[in-house]
Image (cartoon, helix red, strand yellow):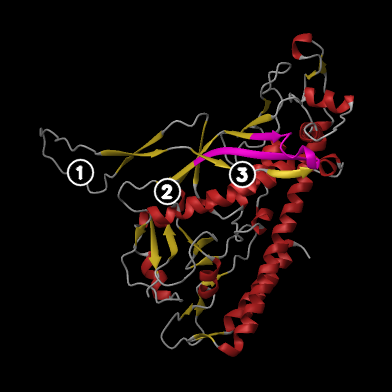
Amino acid sequence: MDITELLQQKGQLAEQAKVLIGDDGVRSEDEGKFNAIHADIDKINKQIEMRAKQESVEKSLSESQGRRSEPNPIDKREDRGGYRPGGKVTDYERGEAMRAWMTAGAPMAELTQEQRDNAKRCGINLDSKRLTFHLSNTALKATTPIRDGFGAGREDIREWNDKRTEERAALTGLQSSTTTGGYTVADEAMRALEVALLAFGGMRTTSTILRTATGGPLPIPTTDDTANKGVIIGENTTSTELEMTFGQLVLDAWKYSSKYILASMEFLQDTSINANQFIGDALGTRIARITNDHFTTGTGSQPNGIVTAATSSAITTAASGTITFDNLVDLEHTIDPAYRSNAKFMMHDTALKIIKKLKVAQYSGDTAGVPLWLPGLTANAPDTILGYPYVINQSMATIIAGSKSVIFGDLSKYMIRDVRDVTVVRLDELYAILGQVAFLALSRHDGDLLDAGTHPVKYLIQGS
């Protein structure tokens, strides 16, 4: 079954679920059937995402084979270590170089000359216990919405945005006396780490990502000129001045640690192990979990979360444990129309479950009604609520009393700042007696909502 057929099946299931939504929502006796239909819809979404991912992989492999067929001359000059590339290095060679660096720290590790030559070719010093990855200036983006805050969204990540495939991150071996580093691109190692950062939670799929070479304070100017208007003046009349007032949002760089991860010598030496995936996924996901929490509900003594920085919708609070059609419409219209053209909802999955059961009559006497949640039935089209895309973020609060359960607005006004250098440390001695090596990732990030006073994002709060 291809993607088009899956989308058709998804539409049919959505119609079946629509029938079960009565005037007062889904009846208790129909709730099991309703949930089962939506479980099937979720499975179809997964199938669509997996098929799209497979198509992307096949395309990538085809392009990669084209690159590997190019000539790859070797530069024999002594000042370049005697074994540096004069052409492109393949993804396989980068992966093997990373495996060699990881294995070099294992007790009684015995590397072949081929592994050592390949590491030198890729600019990696095997004796160094620290590698610094330089993230690209352009952050990885998803081509379709990520629905699952705990990993299923990985299948949505299919392409580098803009020129990401050409603008690769350099892999540099620090403390090196034989290589200068920064010559060979090592996109695959950073791709795994970036995918882990992007896939977890949802904040990175909607926010604006800024990447800087250093971690110094990053001021972003703000101004609110919305109350100022021009005037009509007469002939030969001098115009008067109306000054603009500027403020600024300053992003810092909080240092995050993945905490170290242990790997056995046997694990590292297994030829089936993808070293890039191991470093990028395991270390990246840990940092992704904590940063997504902070980007969502951070207090400001850490990154200032989007919920923390958002403004109250100042509407009647939703009843505890539920959300109504009126609540969502009221929230929608507290946002200025200038921001609604790029607006999205963000919520916990428990809130989405309630919203999926809501419907609204289209005219007087309409007993069938239309569900607020509508499935996207074309390739890359998002599912919507009130016609707006939504993002599931499990770092959001559930719909308990007093919680800020749903936010709405231009989520791209949330700014995430990454310092480009991500350091991976190899700890050789710490667990050597157990035949293990520890790996640790360190990176710096900050985040805050760019709000000059026009309040681009607002929240709905649950009552008691």
**Residue 304 image label:** 2
Residue 414 pos. (x, y %): 44, 48
Query: In the rendered structure, which segment of residues is drawn in magenta?
Result: 424-445
Q: CA distance from mark 2 to mark 3?
A: 20 Å
Q: Which of the two marks, 2 or 3, is nearer to us in this view?
A: 3
Does the CB distance between marks 1 and 3 fall below 8 Å?
Answer: no
- Give the structural element (helix, strand or loop) at label 2: loop
Q: Which of the two marks, 2 or 1, is nearer to us in this view?
A: 2
Instruction: Pick whichever of labels 1 and 3 is earlier in the sequence.
Output: 1
Residue 287 pos. (x, y %): 59, 46
Confirm whether the magenta stretch covers residue 301: no
Q: CA distance from mark 1 to mark 3?
A: 53 Å
Instruction: Pick whichever of labels 2 and 3 is earlier in the sequence.
Output: 3
**Front residue (pair 299, 58):** 299
Magenta region, main secondary structure: strand
Residue type at mark 1 is Gly
Label 1: which residue?
230
- Give the structural element (helix, strand or loop) at label 1: loop
The residue positioned 61% from the left and 54% from the top of the image is: 144
Instruction: Pick whichever of labels 2 and 1 is earlier in the sequence.
Output: 1
- Give the structural element (helix, strand or loop) at label 3: loop
On screen, residue 299 versus residue 76, left or right, reads left
Label 3: which residue?
258
Looking at the figure, which quarter contains the C terminus? bottom left
CA neighbours of label 1 inside 10 A, class few (<14), some (14 to 19), many (20+): few
On screen, residue 156 versus residue 254, left or right, reads right
Residue type at mark 3 is Ser
